[in-house]
Image (spheres, grey):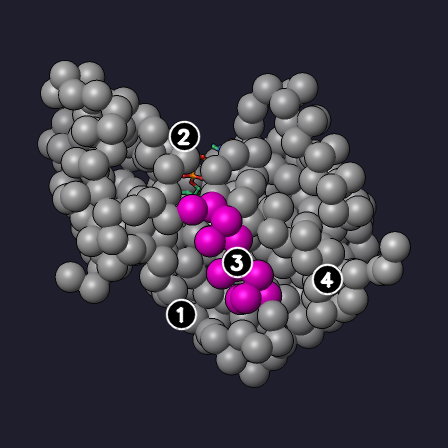
Amino acid sequence: MSQPSSHQRPLAGKHALITGSTSGIGLGIAQRLAAAGASITVNGFGEASQIDALCKDLSTTHGVKVVFDGSDMTQVKAIETMISRAETEFGRLDILVNNAGIQHTAPIASFPVERWDAVIALNLSAVFHGTRCALPGMVARNWGRIINIASAHGLVASVEKSAYVAAKHGVVGLTKVTALEHARSGITCNAICPGWVLTPLVQKQIDARSSAQGIDQAAAKAQLLGEKQPSQEFVTPEQIGELALFLCSDAAAQVRGAAWSIDGGWTAQ
Ligand code: NAD
């Protein structure tokens, strides 16, 4: 059997750490980067046997080294340890995808303070901590790709999502600062701003609509898409994986500080 060419495996020799990659968008990105030849650190929560199977599958399907690190990304010390362990294990960290995120919906006046703190800690502060820990190694090698998974909610707002919208707008701002501080180097930082993607995070919102209004899943999905997403179709984790791979490529070397929408037209309105 012929070996895959460097064109097919453009990330061979690189190591990518994707936070929150046991599920949804993060898993889609991990699969695409592994297929492009990158070795992978998987992070996130879940059942140990499922995570083990997922890591084995990634490794055998794509012939790359895969390590799991279950660090809680709301804990500063855990983030610091995870990045330094990943650098030691693989000798380098070339690509950091700050993806782990949670949602909570409630009007501001009754928004639980503890939920505000949790959303900001994971969706915003973890991006800062991961970035600050990964940068020194990238600077030393003069190459790096930091990809922050923001959201359409990093660009526009919706009611009852104060913490999420504030965090994601913050991520878009942090992305620009990171890009500017390294503009004269081989390190780029960009945000991806997805619209609705059918992952467990969104399934919870569909379930909530379905039970609150007594409508079936299909109707709840149609309603969700109908309110925001002109294409009326979900974005897929695979499509986001392809965009992430592009942002890792040489062709994207001058894409710096962008907030790249992949949202079925949501923010074009
Ligand atoms: P998901 O719930 O499927 O996955 C979230 C991942 O984060 C999981 O792997 C989970 O285990 C992990 N995680 C949760 N808390 C963690 C913690 N404290 N430490 C480490 N890992 C943790 O969600 P998703 O939809 O794939 O979301 C991924 C990212 O994409 C999030 O930042 C989300 O805000 C963003 N996003 C999602 C959508 C969408 O429609 N699904 C749209 C725009 C942006």
Q: Nearer the viewer, mark 2 or mark 4?
A: 4
Q: Say if disc 1 is inside 8 Å of ligand 1.
A: no
Q: Earlier in the sequence, mark 1 or mark 2?
A: 2
Q: Is residue 99 visible?
A: no
Q: Which residue is mark 4?
A: 9
Query: Dot 1: few (<14), some (14–19), or many (≥20) neighbours within 10 Å?
Result: some
* x, y percent for residue 128: 48, 53
Closest to the observer: 8 or 181?
8
For the point 71% across and 69% down, which residue is it?
Answer: 7
Q: Which residue is mark 1?
A: 258
Q: Which residue is mark 3?
A: 242
As drawn, 248 above or below 204: below
Disc 4, SS: loop
* 51 horizontally vs 262: left or right: right
Q: What secondary structure do most residues of the magenta stretch adopt?
A: helix
Tag 2: residue type? Pro
Closest to the observer: 129 or 56?
56
Q: Earlier in the sequence, mark 2 or mark 4?
A: 4
Q: Which residue is mark 2?
A: 200
Q: CA distance from mark 3 to mark 4?
A: 13 Å
The magenta span reads: 236-248
Whether the magenta-drawn stretch holds residue 87 is answered as no
Tag 1: residue type? Ala
* x, y percent for residue 258: 40, 69
* 8 horizontally vs 168: left or right: right
Tell me, yes or no, whether the two marked residues, 2 and 4, touch with CB atoms within 8 Å: no
For the point 19% across and 29% down, which residue is it?
Answer: 219
Query: Dot 2: few (<14), some (14–19), or many (≥20) neighbours within 10 Å?
Result: few
Q: Is residue 45 visible?
A: yes
Q: Nearer the viewer, mark 1 or mark 2?
A: 2
Query: Dot 4: few (<14), some (14–19), or many (≥20) neighbours within 10 Å?
Result: some
The image quadrant in which ligand 1 is located: top left
